[in-house]
Image (cartoon, grey):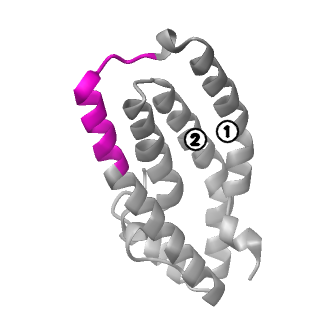
């Protein structure tokens, strides 16, 4: 099984996001008061809900990739029926902001946004590869995805 097929655009996305994450985490550690949200229990509850939704979406998507990509199958069910890129989207819009809420830091929202923008920038190359490998199935799948714009 080729690693590149498993990673998709993930390697390029992470390389572009990690510098922001390192700087942001260091700044948050150095000046925590500047990053506080102050949402208290409501923030903790909302962060817990984000994580409770985001981690299962991410985990199911990862398992599907690990099991089906090696069989050269286009994944069209589960979280992939909801989103074109459920791994990137669930981490960027749910898990990382959820952790930020749990830690009472707006950094989670900033890093989630950077990750989401990076995924939107690099994902089209992954989509072109899928369209080339699955010329009939991929366009049909894209038309059926519930939230293709997310």
For the residue labelled by badge 2, is the local secondary structure a helix, a strand or a loop? Answer: helix
Specify whether residue 83 is in view: no
Magenta segment: does it hold 126?
no
Give the residues in magenta.
36-51
Spot occupied by residue 81 in the image (x, y as percentages of width and height) = 38, 70
Query: Counting other residues with Cα less than 10 Å from the Cα at mark 1, is it few (<14), some (14-19), or many (20 or more)?
Result: some
| Drawn side of residue 108 relative to residue 50, left or right | right
Q: Residue furthest bottom?
A: 71
| Residue beneath the point at 42% across and 16% down | 36
Q: Earlier in the sequence, mark 2 or mark 1?
A: 1
Spot occupied by residue 33 in the image (x, y as percentages of width and height) = 48, 10
Looking at the picture, tell me which residue is in the foreground, 27 or 10.
27
Badge 1 is on which residue?
17
Above or below, comparing residue 31 to residue 103 in the picture: above
Badge 2 is on which residue?
115
| Drawn side of residue 18 relative to residue 142, left or right | right
Looking at the picture, tell me which residue is in the foreground, 77 or 41.
41
For the residue labelled by badge 1, is the local secondary structure a helix, a strand or a loop? Answer: helix
Above or below, comparing residue 41 to residue 36 in the picture: below
| Residue beneath the point at 44% across and 69% down | 60
Spot occupied by residue 8 in the image (x, y as percentages of width and height) = 67, 64
Above or below, comparing residue 120 to residue 124 in the picture: above
Pick the quarter of the image with the N terminus. bottom right
């Amino acid at each position: 099984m080729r690693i590149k097929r498993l990673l998709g655009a993930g390697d390029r996305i992470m390389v572009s996001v990690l510098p922001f994450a390192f700087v942001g985490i260091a700044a948050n550690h150095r000046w925590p008061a500047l990053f506080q949200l102050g949402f208290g229990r409501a923030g903790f509850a909302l962060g817990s809900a984000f994580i409770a939704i985001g981690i299962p979406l991410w985990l199911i998507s990862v398992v599907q990739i690990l099991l089906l990509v090696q069989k050269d199958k286009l994944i069209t069910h589960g979280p992939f029926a909801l989103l074109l890129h459920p791994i990137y989207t669930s981490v960027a819009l749910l898990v990382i902001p959820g952790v930020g809420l749990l830690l009472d830091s707006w950094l989670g929202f900033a890093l989630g946004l950077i990750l989401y923008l990076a995924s939107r920038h690099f994902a089209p190359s992954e989509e072109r590869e899928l369209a080339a490998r699955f010329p009939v199935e991929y366009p049909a799948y894209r038309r059926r995805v519930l939230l293709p714009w997310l």
